[in-house]
Amino acid sequence: MAQNEGSVSSALFWMVLLSILLIWLPGIGPFVAGFVGGKKAGGLKNALLAFLVPAALFTIAIILLPGAPFLTLMISIAAFPMLVIYNGMLFVGAIIGALVS
């Protein structure tokens, strides 16, 4: 039986899509998105590459969303725990999904 190599683009697609759809589940949503993306990646290296894009997009969205510089700084500081939880769970899910595949 041949092993499916997987792809970064497929993993990236599923991580971004599921992150958007499951954003209302803090912690669990990013983990599921990372897990599915990690499985689709087919390997740890591909999973980690795919993890970088949704993590960066979410971080940039949190930082730039409000628009006003001072307000952006205050929201960024207040949102730091959310960023850590989101990106951390996405990372853990991607690693576990890649190792399970």
Image (tube, grey):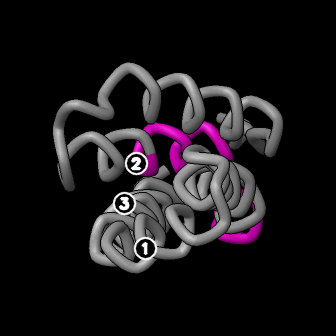
**Of marks 1 and 3, which one's residue comes earlier in the chain?**
1
Identity of the residue drawn at 50% across and 63% down:
71
The mark closer to the camera, 3 or 2, is 3
Kindly identify which numbered label has been placed on residue 86.
3
Using the rendered image of the protein, determine whether residue 51 is visible from the camera's viewpoint.
no
User: Looking at the picture, which amino acid does disc 2 mark?
Assistant: Phe
C-alpha span from label 3 to label 2: 13 Å
Please report contact status of discs 3 and 2: CB closer than 8 Å, yes or no.
Answer: no
- Residue indicated by mark 2: 35
Identity of the residue drawn at 47% across and 70% down:
76
- Residue indicated by mark 1: 74
The mark closer to the camera, 1 or 3, is 1
Q: Which residues are magenta?
A: 34-47
**75 w.r.t. 1: above or below:** below
User: Looking at the picture, which amino acid does disc 3 mark?
Assistant: Tyr
Left or right? Give the position of 32 relative to 12.
left
**51 w.r.t. 81: above or below:** above
C-alpha span from label 1 to label 3: 19 Å
Identity of the residue drawn at 56% across and 46% down:
66
The mark closer to the camera, 2 or 1, is 1
Q: Position of residue 34 (x, y in %)?
A: 45, 50
C-alpha span from label 2 to label 1: 32 Å
Q: Secondary structure at mark 2?
A: helix
Using the rendered image of the protein, determine whether residue 74 is visible from the camera's viewpoint.
yes
Q: Residues within 10 Å of mark 2 (few under 14, many from 20)?
A: many
The verdict on residue 48 being magenta is no
Q: Secondary structure at mark 3?
A: helix
Q: Residues within 10 Å of mark 1 (few under 14, many from 20)?
A: few
Please report contact status of discs 1 and 3: CB closer than 8 Å, yes or no.
Answer: no
**Of marks 2 and 1, which one's residue comes earlier in the chain?**
2
User: Looking at the picture, which amino acid does disc 1 mark?
Assistant: Met
Q: Where does the N terminus fall, quadrant-wise?
A: top right
